[in-house]
Image (cartoon, rainbow, N blue to C red):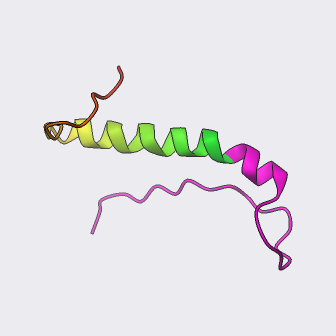
Amino acid sequence: MPRALVVHAVEAADAALGTGLSEPVRAALPELADRVLAFVRQAHDATGQRQSEGAPPTPA
């Protein structure tokens, strides 16, 4: 089990059935994805693990 659990989320304004994402949720996804990626990279770097060969370098 992990020592900590971090949840990245977008709060729903309407949970009615439908298809696709609302425009506010769709607009929030790029920032959410960037934050999750930065968090994962930071956690990975903190473990001291090396980047896999061929993987793009982590931005500083």
| Image quadrant assignment for residue 40 | top left
Quadrant including the N terminus = bottom left
| Image quadrant assignment for residue 49 | top left
Is 15 inside the magenta-drawn segment?
A: yes
Percent of width and height locating residue 3: 30, 59
| Residue 5 appears left or right of 26 | left
Q: Main secondary structure of the magenta part?
A: loop
Percent of width and height locating residue 4: 36, 57
Give the total of numbered labels. 0
Figure check: 15 above or below 9? below
Extreme residue toward the top, this view? 60
Is 20 inside the magenta-drawn segment?
A: yes
Residue drawn at (77%, 62%) of the image: 12
Magenta residue span: 1-28
Figure check: 6 above or below 30? below
Q: Nearer the viewer, residue 54 or 23?
A: 54
| Residue 54 appears left or right of 32 | left
Figure check: 60 above or below 28? above
Q: Nearer the viewer, residue 6 or 51?
A: 51
Q: Nearer the viewer, residue 53 or 12?
A: 53
| Image quadrant assignment for residue 11 | bottom right
